[in-house]
Image (tube, grey):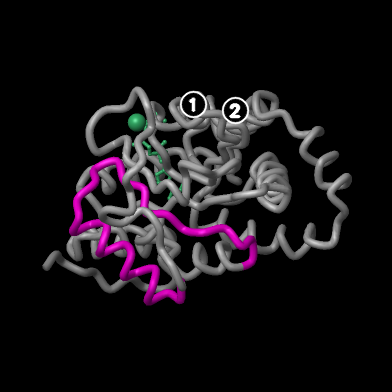
Amino acid sequence: MGIHLKIPRNHVRAHSLKKREAVIRAEEKGILAKAGLIAHGRGEAFDYLIGETSIPPAIFATKAAVASLILAAHPVISVNGNVAALVPREIVRLSKVLNAPLEVNLFFRTRRREEAIKSVLLKAGAKEVLGVGRDASATIPELFSERRRVDPRGIYSADVVLVPLEDGDRTMALKRLGKFVITIDLNPLSRTAQSADITIVDDIVRAVPNMIEAYKELKDLSREELASLLTRFDNRKNLSEVILYIRDRLKILSEGEHL
Ligand code: ATP
Ligand code: MG
């Protein structure tokens, strides 16, 4: 067991420390690979730059993402160790409201980790979890070894996939398979962020509840209205907005202002 700190509630980094605790625990329980801890750290650094809040371009991307998931014929939500560690209940809730199945989708696939993530999701209220064991029998062409395995009933046959914290090679492979790819990634410069159709640059801990809220707002819109929201969304332009937001924020901070 690792050392678990008692985090005072008013600590300035309380939210961030709680998330660290959650990923450390998940690693100890075999839910998260060690590399997942490092990925978390990279995310934290970008969260610091955006100010640990859901910025306007993230909210816009969240709405576009939910619109495309509502319009999808066969939407699927991918779950890896970081997602299971940080937002198990929220991702199950999102899967239910969108009627989009959950699929365990791992960069470092081991049977033990697949089962550990499945059991976290079942405990959080999921009825079914795809992509475990022999269910992950389809392969994404051009990818090597265990990284390419997906469920034929899930990601393989999906039209729209939500792949939070995904790897760049796999995102590009999903694009080549003709999928409409939505990601949640704090790094606006990652290959995943740059190659997805919709990139929500936000912490998954804020983004998934925001998606559930956006669903409530959008669920009664017509298909035409949802489609027009999507037409107005341009991922390149939105990522530029994120980078400009960071630039402007750093400029203000560099001038000695406190935000
Ligand atoms: P890519 O392979 O897309 O070029 P990468 O190799 O830099 O990206 P990976 O480790 O493959 O990064 O993917 C993890 C991504 O998840 C990182 O870009 C990181 O910023 C992001 N990330 C980590 N924690 C969170 C979080 N809590 N919420 C959202 N994004 C996160
Ligand atoms: Mg990567």
Q: Which badge, 2 or 1, comes first in the chain's sequence?
A: 1
For the point 81% across and 47% down, the residue is 226
Find residue 243 and report its image quarter: top right
Percent coordinates x, y for residue 154 in the rendering:
47, 50
The quadrant of the picture occupied by the N terminus is bottom left
Q: In the orientation shown, which residue stands out farthest toward the left?
A: 1
Percent coordinates x, y for residue 173 in the rendering:
44, 27
Regarding residue 87, the answer to whether it shows in the image is yes
Query: Which stretch appears magenta?
Result: 97-126
Q: Nearer the viewer, residue 177 or 31?
A: 177
Q: Nearer the viewer, residue 176 or 46?
A: 176
Element assignment for label 1: loop
- Residue flagged by tag 1: what amino acid is it? Leu
Regarding residue 82, the answer to whether it shows in the image is no
Q: Is 163 rendered above or below residue 84? A: above
The verdict on residue 104 being magenta is: yes
For the point 41% across and 42% down, the residue is 43
Q: Is residue 47 left or right of residue 199?
A: left
Q: Marks 2 and 1: CB-CB under 8 Å?
A: yes
Percent coordinates x, y for residue 239 in the rendering:
62, 29
Find residue 21 and report its image quarter: bottom left
Mark 1 crowdedness (10 Å alpha carbons): few <14, some 14-19, many ≥20: some
Tell which tag, 2 or 1, sits nearer the viewer.
1
Q: Is residue 59 left or right of residue 123?
A: right
- Residue flagged by tag 2: what amino acid is it? Ile
Q: Quadrant of ligand 2?
A: top left
For the point 35% across and 23% down, the residue is 142
Q: Nearer the viewer, residue 60 or 45?
A: 60
Q: Where does label 1 land, which residue?
A: 189
Mark 2 crowdedness (10 Å alpha carbons): few <14, some 14-19, many ≥20: some
